[in-house]
Amino acid sequence: MRRTLEVIGEFIRDIYGSTFLRGKLDDKISRIEEIVRAYHVLQKGNWGKQVDLSKDFMENVLPLLEVALQWKHLKQSGKISNKFMEQCRKRMRASGSNFRGVMFELDMATRCLLSKWEVDFPETRIKNVKTIDLIVKKKEEVIALECTSKRGTDIIDIQKIKETIEEKKNKFNPENLQLLKVQFTKKIIVFDITRPDYKRPAISGEVSEIRNMPYIDGIILTWREDVIDKNGHSIRIKYKCQGEIPDEYFSVTWAIDCLLYTSDAADELD
């Protein structure tokens, strides 16, 4: 369990310059509700060889650990540049009440880096213009990527997804994209629909109902799912796509394996 605390602590230190789980939370992070909740869960936990698979742990600690593990691997591999780190710091520090939404942007940005895509944050280059969240590139392919978190909502259905697409579509308006001075080959909205209990979302089988998306080439539903087998729990990344994109578009997926039982591990899956 010690490694789990170190991984989350290193991520918070890199982004906010703050220590975590060593005394009182400092002012930089003490007003961020999600970090405060994780802090209190970990402070009151009785962590021995086996971690308590509690609702509090799954809802308040795992969401931080998911991104922090990807971040740590990329840092160790030398794949987080100073520019990328500073962009992430700016996005997170300016997140305000949208901490969960910006965490999902970082989640997708780090997933893309793990999948050998180049990543940029266009909002750091164009002020006073509401535009897409990420530009991701691989060879000749350049994607305009908008990230939307529906995580933790009590109910999510296709109608809500369609309404969000309608709200976001103007970000992909050709006039807005031209301001970025980038020639895009695809325009995609990705939705995080992870459920509070990490079960498979029922909506994932209904994605084919979404058609006729103005300015958009496709959508991606993604979630983390608790897969239980003889080795224990494995929190795995899943994708379901609609439009002219395959389900394995971002080829690298990760799992937090056996985390809640005997050891901490993040594995890349084929």
Image (tube, rainbow, N blue to C red):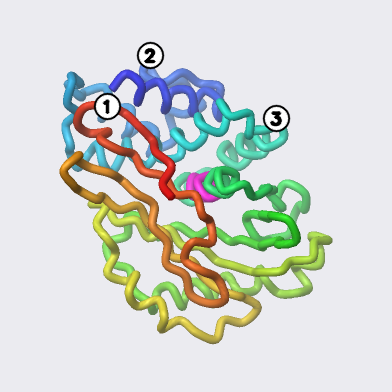
The disc placed on residue 263 is 1
- Taking the magenta stretch, the answer to whether it contains residue 106 is yes
Task: Give the overall secondary structure of the magenta segment.
Answer: helix
Q: Choose between 257 and 100: the one closer to the eye.
A: 257
**Looking at the image, do the residues carrying marks 2 and 3 touch, with CB atoms under 8 Å apart?**
no
Name the residue beneath numbered marker 2. 22
Magenta-highlighted residues: 103-108
Kind of residue at disc 3 = Asn
Name the residue at 18% across, 37% down: 53
Residue 222 point in image, percent of width and height: 42, 60
Look at the numbered disc 2 and give the secondary structure of its residue.
loop
User: Spatial distance from mark 3 to mark 1, Cα to Cα?
Assistant: 31 Å
Specify the quadrant of the image occupied by residue 212.
bottom right
Pick the front one: 100 or 33: 100
Res. 189 mark: none
**Relative height, residue 252 to residue 190 (above, below):** above
In the rendered view, tell whether residue 157 sits above or below residue 83.
below
Mark 2 residue type: Arg
Tag 2: Cα neighbours inside 10 Å, few (<14), some, or many (≥20)?
few
Circle 3 is placed at which residue position?
82
Q: Nearer the viewer, mark 2 or mark 3?
A: 3
Q: Position of residue 142 (x, y in %)?
A: 71, 61
Residue type beneath disc 1:
Ser
Residue that appears at 69% across and 32% down: 81
